[in-house]
Amino acid sequence: MLLQSLQNINKVLDNLINITYQDMEDIKQAHHNNLFQRNENKEKLLSQFISLKAQIDSILVKRSESGLDISQIINPEEDKLLGEFKRKLKNFYDIHKKFSKMALLVTNFYNNLLHKATGSEVDIGYKIQQSNNLYSSFSLKG
């Protein structure tokens, strides 16, 4: 069961990574409709990811309750897939961070253009604030 869940979650991450690369290319080419058309698929993949991650967590928690050492509850193939999962998750994080910066820059560009043309702005739901977060100074408005 763990083996199958790890294989599936790695496939989901591969799909999310590929879609994010496509999104970045579409931003560069100003093909914004393509971005919106993939949203439903991304939401399905994210739901699958969340479900699979919960399954993996549950299996690992149950196995760890036996009191055995980690090397005894995870076989070498599972260990290899866990390592692959960690690498892909880190890769997705890095790629998505780049995508988010690109999307925010484009949004700010169009917002500034709108402001100069009409004197109004579109609230995009972000504000810049001082933060202890090492990764970003942006936060969602609540």
Image (cartoon, helix red, strand yellow):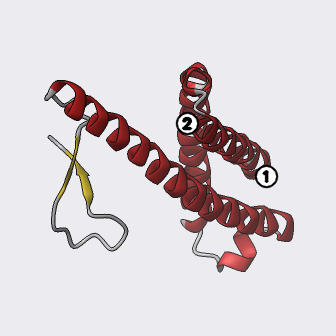
Based on the displayed image, in which of its 4 quarters is residue 65 positioned?
bottom right
Residue matched to label 1: 3
Spot occupied by residue 35 in the image (x, y as percentages of width and height): 57, 28
Which amino acid type corresponds to the residue marked 1 in the rendered image? Answer: Leu
- Of 141 and 103, the residue lying toward us: 103
How many residues crowd mark 1 within 10 Å: few (<14), some (14–19), many (20+)?
some
Q: Between residue 132 and residue 46, name the one nearer to us.
A: 132
Label 2: few (<14), some (14–19) or many (≥20) C-alpha neighbours in 10 Å:
some
Residue on which the image places disc 2: 46
Which of the numbered marks, if any, corresponds to residue 36?
Answer: none
Instruction: Give percent across and percent down for residue 111.
Output: 29, 35
Up-down: is 22 above or below 91? Answer: above
> Which residue is most to the right?
77
Please tell me which residue lies in front, 49 or 16. Answer: 16
Secondary structure of the residue carrying tag 2 is helix
Identity of the residue drawn at 61% across and 33% down: 45
In the picture, measured across the screen, residue 76 lies left or right of residue 87, that is: right
Which image quarter is the C terminus in?
top left
Mark 1 and 2 residues: CB-CB less than 8 Å, in contact? no
Q: Does any portion of residue 123 appear in the rendered image?
A: no
Q: Of residues 100 and 122, which is closer to you in this image?
A: 122
The residue mark sitting in front, 1 or 2, is 2
Among all residues in the image, which is located at the extreme front?
A: 117
Give the amino acid at mark 2.
Leu
Which residue is depicted at the point 22% across and 34% down?
Answer: 116
- Across and down, in percent, residue 101 comes to 45, 53
Separation of residues labelled 1 and 2 (CA atoms): 20 Å
> Which comes before the other along the chain, label 1 or label 2?
1
Q: Quadrant of residue 31?
A: top right
Instruction: Tell me the quarter of the picture where residue 88 sits.
Output: bottom right
* Residue displayed at 53% across by 28% down: 43
Image coordinates of residue 18 in percent, x first then y, are 72, 43
